[in-house]
Amino acid sequence: MNQLFDHNQTLKSLYLSLVEDNDNDNDQIHEHVCLDSIDGVLRSVLSIEEMKDAGSFFTGDELAIELSNKFDRPITDNAVILDPTCGAGNLLLACSRQLGICETLSNTLTRWGHVLRGYDLYSSFVEATKLRIILEAVRRGCELDCSLEEALELLPNIKTADAMTISSDDVLSVSHAVMNPPFSSWESPKVNFWKQGKVNAAGVVFEHFLRILPRECEFSAILPEVLRSGTRYQGWRDFVQNSAVNASIHVVGRFNSKTDVDVFIVDGRVAGSEEPIDWLTDLTESSTRIGDYFDVSVGRLVAYRDLEEGEQHPYIHPKNLPAWSTVKEFSETRRFDGTVFKPPFVVIRRTSSPSDRYRAVGTIIGGRIPVAVENHLIVIKPGHATLVNCRKLLKVLKSSQTNDFLNDRIRCRHLTVGAVKQIPYLG
């Protein structure tokens, strides 16, 4: 991926002009070390699909500063700070701003070169990271006393490498780890892993470094919401809980205005532990939940996979159901020999975003005939199956309290059975 080649050439030309003019043009430099601007540079040369495939979404100013401020131990010249998927260097830049400078650029970079460590798959990203760190030192007032080639060589620990090939021997001296790993989908490793098949890459990278970082190393990471609240990532959460102490979770919300992914921050210290981590919104012991009164499950019909065999049944899916209504007559039927549901019950759409007006959009299913329910719907069936109980539930689902709960509990773009069961319910 050489899409940052032209951008890097601009940074090099800027440095050379600063040397020739013997002048630190802070306005020009600021534009190129601004943590919010590099995302726009990447978007100008990559499609959103290419960015997703590469996992290249750069941490903006506010998030990067928050991550770098999460550490208990201060970032000093004695620290070793690792960003294992450094991209264009935003997190390392944020950390460098907590380091002091020397009078000259060469002395400053020599000191910073011992502290700052980063890896990335793409050499153009690594080069961009080094160039931006060099310009950051100049912006802060260092005297230009070396060539660009010499300056680049003073940051030897920022290099092109696959984070997943890094071993414990490579990170023995690391005291602080800061991460924004890729959010793309990977095949899971075959051993010592929580789930087989396609999984979120950020979970893979984060787990790998929890395994290899030295004990007492502090970490601070920005991760996709699915790891915090997704049902299939419970094994990942268990591993993190057993591998960290003083760990805390902070739900951030949307990554940035141009990236429709919700994220959270996890920070703590590497060590064997059984300390509980407060991953999710807790309810008091006296609170009652939907799962106390209703059976909750996913619709069983998978339209693209299930053959049209068996009896003919009314067939419901998100596109043929009116929201917040009661349906007793059905516009579609389908042969299905799997599990069907006898009314009355409520269904809610699994697709759900924190930006939606309602997180749990429901429809009451009435009548007497068993219904085939597509797997994009969650079925909520009252223990005492009456329309009165279904109507009570619909009011709960439409309430602001349910919206608030789900926006804390699960900021993924879909709902899970576990999250729905935990919705507060006063029957």
Image (cartoon, rainbow, N blue to C red):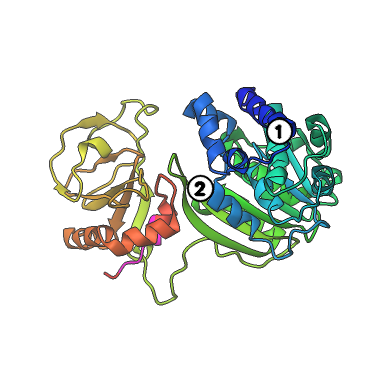
In the rendered structure, does residue 422 fall within the stretch colored magenta? yes
* Point 71% across, 58% down: residue: 243
Where residue 142 sits: x, y (%)? 75, 47
Tag 1: residue type?
Asp
Compared across the picture, whether 44 is left or right of 314 comes to: right
User: Compared with residue 385, is residue 416 higher up or lower down, i.e. above or below?
Assistant: above
Is residue 190 in view from this perspective? no
Instruction: Judge by depth and name the residue closer to the eye, 161 or 234.
Output: 161
Q: Is residue 169 visible?
A: yes
Percent x, y of residue 71:
68, 61
Could you tell me how far apart the alpha carbons at marks 1 and 2 are, in whole angstroms?
50 Å
Q: Position of residue 187 (x, y in %)?
A: 62, 33
Circles 1 and 2: CB atoms closer than 8 Å = no
Magenta-drawn stretch, dominant element (helix, strand or loop): loop
Q: Which mark is residue 21?
A: 1
User: Quarter holding the C terminus?
Assistant: bottom left
Question: x and y percent of residue 172 in the render?
Answer: 85, 50
Residue to which mark 2 is pinned: 226
First reached walking from the N terminus: tag 1 or tag 2: 1
Specify few, some or many for label 2: CA neighbours under 10 Å numbering under 14, 14-19, or 20 or more.
many
- Badge 1 element: helix
Magenta-highlighted residues: 420-425
| In the rendered image, the vertical position of residue 405 relative to residue 144, given as above or below | below
The disc labelled 2 sits on which kind of residue? Val
Q: Residue furthest bottom?
A: 286
Q: Nearer the viewer, residue 100 or 354?
A: 100
